[in-house]
Each structure stands twice: as C-alpha cells, then as structure tokens.
Amino acid sequence: MAGFSIDEILSKNKAAAPAGQALQVVMLPAENIKPNPENSIYEIGDVSMLKADIAERGLRSPLEVLPAKNGKYMLLAGHRRWTACRELAAENVPGFALLPCVVRESHGSDDDLIALITSNATARELTDGERLRQYLVLKKALENKKAAGNLDGRVRDAMSRITGDGTGTLGRLNSIATHCTPQVLEMLSKGEIGITRAYECSRLYKVQQEQYAKTGWSSMPNITDSARRAAIQYLVEDGLADQLRRFDYVEHEEWNYYDNLDARKMVPITLEIDTVGALRLEPKSQYTVTVQQLDDEDGSEVTAETDISPRDYFDQARKLYIDRDALKKKKQAESQKKTAEKARKAQSEKWEALAREKMQRFDDWKKVAQAKELGLVFREYPTADGGRIVVMADEVTRNDKADGIPYGNYFVARFAADGKRINRDGSSAAMNWFCQWYGSARLDMIIAEDLKTREDSDER
C-alpha cells in the first residue's frame, strides 16, 4: 500500500505513487466503504449532476480510503463520488457494486485529517460555513503536529498552502472563530450571513454581534441604574472632585460650569464594585465620560455602555460641595426680598384700591367742560405736582357698577402745572404722540401713585 507524509500533503502530491511505481488501484465492495466522520465539516450537497456524469462515463477517478476494522475501509477522499455511486447502486444501475480505490496507509489521526482536508479544500467552491469549519479543524491538526515537532515553519503558512487562502483570509477566519458568539457562528454555518458580515461582527463586543449580524447595525445597552449611580459617585467624589469642589453652587447653575470643566483631565480607571462588578471609566470629550460595564468572566468584553455628562452629576456635586454658610445667607436675603416685595405689593394694592374709590366718585370731580349735543363730559383730577388729569367720558356708556370711572368709554390726558400736555407718567415727552389722549389703561395706577406722593409729602 502506498503511504504519504505531511510533506506530500503540503506539496499537494498526495495522489502520486512513489517515484517509479504505478498507482495501485483495487476494486473494493461499495458496502465495505464507510464515510469518514471528519468529513462532516463539508456538505455533500446535491450530487445529481455528478451522478448523471458517473452513470454515463463511469467513475474515472478512484476513491482514496484507509483500512478500518473488520475488513472495512474508511473514505479519505471522494465522499461526493461515493455518495453518487451508492445512489446509483440503490437505483439498481449495474457496475457500482465494486468501486475503484487507492488504499492509503494511515499516518495518524492528524495526518489523516489533513489529507482529507487537502482533498476537499480546492476541489470545489466551499460555502462560508464549510470554510470556517475547515479552518478550525485544520488549524487544530497542524498545531498538534507543530507541538510534536513534525511541522516546520508557521501553522498559518501551512494552512495557506493546503487551502489556497491568503493570510488576510485566514486572519479573518481566525478573528471569526476567536471572537464571534455561538449565535453568529450558527448563522454563518446556516448560510444566513457571509464571511464579511461575520468578520465585522468579530470586531464588535459580543453583546452587539447578534443584532449586527441580523441588521448590519448595532447599539450598546445602557448600564444598569446601580452602575450609573456608582459611576456618578466616583466622578463626584474622586475622578472630577478637584474641579467640582471649586465651583460656586450658590450663585450659579449647572450651565455656568461647562467652560470651566474638562473631563479629559480625569485618568481612565477600572473600578471593582461589589454590587455592580467591573466598571471602566474614561474621558470621551471635554464634558463627557464614557462608562462601560465589563463582563464578569472576560474583562475585555463590554456588556453595556453609557455616557455621563455634567447634567447627570451636577445635583450630587452641588449637595456635596455647596458652601452652606453662603447658601444660608442667600436664602436669608431672598426671604427678606420676598418680605419686602410682599409689603410693597400690599402697599401698591392699598393705593390702587383708594384710587379706584376716587375714580368711582368721578361725578364729584370738577367739571371743566361739557358737550351735551355730543354726550361728552370733561372732568379733572388735580395732581400733587400742581398739574391735572382730565378725563373725557362718553355719557352714553354710563355704568355705575364699574370698578373705577362709572363709564364704559373714556379718554385721559395729563397736563403739567404750566398747562402743557405731558406723558401719562408725568414726564415731558419730546414726541407729541406721547402727549395725546389715551384710553383707560391703568388710570388707577396713575392716581394711586399720585395719592402715595401726597402722603409722602405730608409725612415730610
């Protein structure tokens, strides 16, 4: 029986006999030939066209087999041809009870596996699932030979010579095999995704891979609430403490600090927290820190990620670093301001109420003119500065229930002590339109201010 070595395999001369010897082909009963379990990495697929060719022209290439127990043989190369022949025999097509075979000598399980892969690697176009399975078992077999001192050079170079794949392709297959989740590997095996999509998945964190495999995009889950609280506590009390404790939390709000905060000064750190696990914190920008929750078993894997900004930790920093004495003084000042405002408002309401009483007694005001044929009456209210306020009321709109002047429609003009028309607030106006007659808007406030002025003058 002709044997073979690893050198013959790697140089792709496994089908040749030793120099000067003819290839020894023997006819073996088809029923004594069994498939090789290691061939499960490949798919037999549809052999109908191959079966038709063999039925017409015969089996032109012998099968390669290894001796097995009890007079049986195990396929080394030719599983698709053997399958086609078995189907022809089952259909009672004559001539397939005995099959031409080359019996090889076993050189050990790893060499036998390498020989099987060599016969399949370039014989036909492999599916992406087959290529990955082939990569995994071939790499293992070659690594075994390397460890035993039976392989010179690098494993990857040997794989490239056997499969015809370049180092780039082998690198992608290695990344897929090493980093992809079982779910992604299963999708690749079933043909749901290809090598390219699987390789893209291998460059992501495992928590992102299945979503990316299905959709071509992925997002990261947010960290848990407890992890978020722990990260914020660290940032406030340690990571950014030197910057945060300098801020004035009494007079300024959160947005005042953005230009004075630089998260990039924080040193990246990985924290071990009993209730959360491992958290990695590192600056992302001037204002943002990225917090990653790490896998308990593999610290290089991120299971969740969230960005933390000042708005997330400002309140906690304020509670911790605020100047209590300054806050107390500010609250006292605000309280005094509210008390003063309340008193001012009460006084204002008092004078406005008195002003409305004056307005309700409009009929007692001095009449300065009347146009009976027009239904108009003019009355005046003397002001403390020696001037006067003249009100022209439309008598047709008499309304005794009004809260002020007992007419629905009236107009007002104000005059200084010298008789010149002035603005409603008593000031002189450069533009004439300020001095025109105006409607009833807040006449009560004008009179209220005048009443207050009178009282202040009397007190002085």
Image: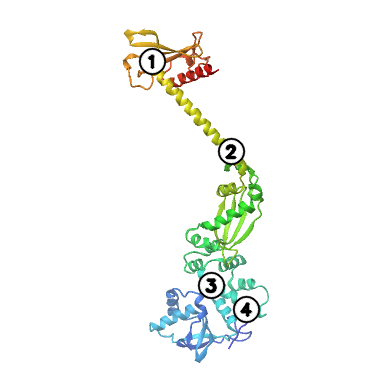
User: Which residue lies under the disc numbered 4?
Assistant: 144
Q: Tell me the CA gap for discs 4 and 2.
A: 78 Å
The amino acid at mark 3 is Arg
Q: Nearer the viewer, residue 62 or 353?
A: 353
Q: Mark 2 or 1 closer to N-term? A: 2
Q: Residues within 10 Å of mark 2 (few under 14, many from 20)?
A: some
Q: Tell me the CA gap for discs 3 and 4.
A: 17 Å
Q: Residues within 10 Å of mark 3 (few under 14, many from 20)?
A: some
Can you say whether 2 is above or below 340 in the image?
A: below
Percent of width and height locating residue 321 = 62, 47
Q: Tell me the CA gap for discs 2 and 1.
A: 47 Å
Percent of width and height locating residue 147 = 65, 78
The amino acid at mark 4 is Asn
User: Which residue lies under the disc numbered 3?
Assistant: 133
Q: Tell me the CA gap for discs 1 and 4.
A: 114 Å
User: Which residue lies under the disc numbered 1?
Assistant: 362
Can you say whether 274 is above or below 417 in the image?
A: below
User: Which residue lies under the disc numbered 2?
Assistant: 330
Q: Mark 3 or 2 closer to N-term? A: 3
The amino acid at mark 1 is Phe
